[in-house]
Amino acid sequence: MAQKRQREEDKTAEASGGSKQPGSGSKATLGQQTSHIKNKLVRAELYAKLKHKQKKQKKVERKRRDAEAARAEELGLEPPPKKQQKTLENTREKDVTMVEEGDEEVALDEADDEFAAHFAREQEPKVLVTTCYKPSKTMFTFLAEMLEVLPRVEYYKRQGFPLKQVVGFAAGRDYSDLLVFNEDRKEVNGLLHVHLPDGPTAHYRLSSLVLGQDIRGHGRPSSHRPELVLNNFGTRLGRRVGRMLGSLFHQEPQFRGRRVATFHNQRDFIFFRHHRYIFEEKESKAEAAQPGRPKTAVVARMQELGPRFTLKLQSLQKGTFDSKHGEFEWVHKKDMDTSRRRFHL
C-alpha cells in the first residue's frame, strides 16, 4: 500500500512539474493533478498535501512582495505593481461596440438621438406611471415610493385601457416617458419604459425588490430633485439604455437635498439604489497624533431611502410600443448566455 501511494505521489509530482491543461496555456490545477488517482482516500490525502504546499509557496511569495514594497518605500522609489485579482469584469470578452472616451462618431449620434433635447436642457422630464390590470397592495406601496423618487411624475389608474391607447394618451398630453409596472402573483416583476413621442421602448425584468419601509434604518426623501449616477454603461447599447434611464431625471439637481439616485450596471444587471448623504466633522485620532495637523476630519455618511430593485434588459424596440409590427434594436436570447464573460451593456 505504501509503495502504491509512493508511486501515485511520484506521478503527481511529474504532472505538477510544469504540466498544462490541454488546449490552454495555464498550469494544471490541483484537481487535475490528482484526478488520475482512483483510490478516494489516497487522492484526498495527496490533495491536502499539495494544497498545504501551495499555501506555503503563496505565503513566501507574499512576504517577498511586501519586503520589496517596504524597501522601495524606504529608498523613495515607486513600489512594484500589485497583482490584480481576476474577476468576470476584467476578464470579459472583448466587445467591438465598447465606446472609447472622446469617440466623435458616438458623440455625433447622441447629439441627434431621441434624448438629445433632454440632455441639451431644452425639454424637462414629465413621467406618467401606470400598472397592469388589478394591481395589489404591494404594487401601490411600491408606486408610492417611486413617486417620491422621480422628480416630475404623475400616476394614472389603468382602468382596463389597452397599452397602445395609454401610449397615445400620454403622447397627446406632452409626457416625455411612460412607465408601466407589471406584477405576477402579487410580486412586481416587470417594467415597460416608453420614451415619448418617438420611442424607443425598453422592456426589463424586475427582481429583488425591497421596499423602503423594509430597509433597516431607512429615511424619508425630501422634495428636492435628486442627483443621478449612471455606472458602467460602456457599450453602444449600454449608453443608449443609460441615456434612456437618465431622461427620467432633471439635468439640474438640487444639491441642497443631498439625494442621489443610482443605476449601477454590473454583468448586465442594473441595480437601483436611492440614498441621502451627509458630511460631518469628526475627531480623527490619527491626525491628532501628528503635531501641526487638524484634529478633525470630514466624514461622509449615507442613509438609504429606498426602494431598491434590480433590472435586467429583455428587449429594446424602435419607436413606441408595438407588439405586432414593432422593429427591435436588441432582444435577449438564450444563446447569448453561453459564456459568463460576455456582457452586452
Image (cartoon, rainbow, N blue to C red):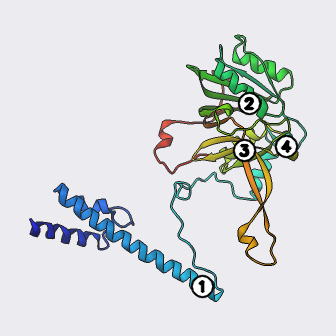
Q: What separation in Å lies between label 2 and label 1 (alpha carbons)?
A: 53 Å
Q: Is residue 305 above or below residue 46?
A: above
Can you tell which quarter of the image residue 143 is in? top right
User: Where does the N terminus fall, quadrant-wise?
Assistant: bottom left
Residue 63 place in picture, x, y as percent: 47, 78
SS type, badge 3: strand
Question: Which residue is labeled 1 in the image?
Answer: 72
CA gap, disc 1 and disc 3: 41 Å
Residue 226 appears in the figure: yes
Packing grade of label 3 (10 A; few <14, some 14-19, many >=20) is: some
Q: Which residue is mark 3?
A: 303
Disc 1, SS: helix
Residue pointed to by mark 2: 146
Residue designated by label 4: 257
Point out the residue furthest to the top here: 160
Please say if the residues under marks 4 and 2 sit with CB atoms less than 8 Å apart.
no
Q: State how many labels appear.
A: 4
Which type of secondary structure does the marked residue at label 2 adopt?
helix
Q: Nearer the viewer, mark 3 or mark 2?
A: 3
Along the line of sight, the residue nearer the viewer: 270 or 52:
52
What type is the residue that disc 3 sits on? Gln
**Residue at horizontal 65%, vertical 13%?**
134
Residue 37 visible in this rendered orientation of the protein:
no
- Decide: is 25 above or below 130: below
Asked if 248 appears above or below 96 in the picture, the reply is: above
> Residue 191 sits in which quadrant?
top right
Give the residue at the far right of this rendering: 122
Q: CA distance from mark 4 to mark 3?
A: 13 Å
The residue carrying pointer 2 sits among few (fewer than 14), some (14 to 19) or many (20 or more) residues within 10 Å by Cα, namely some
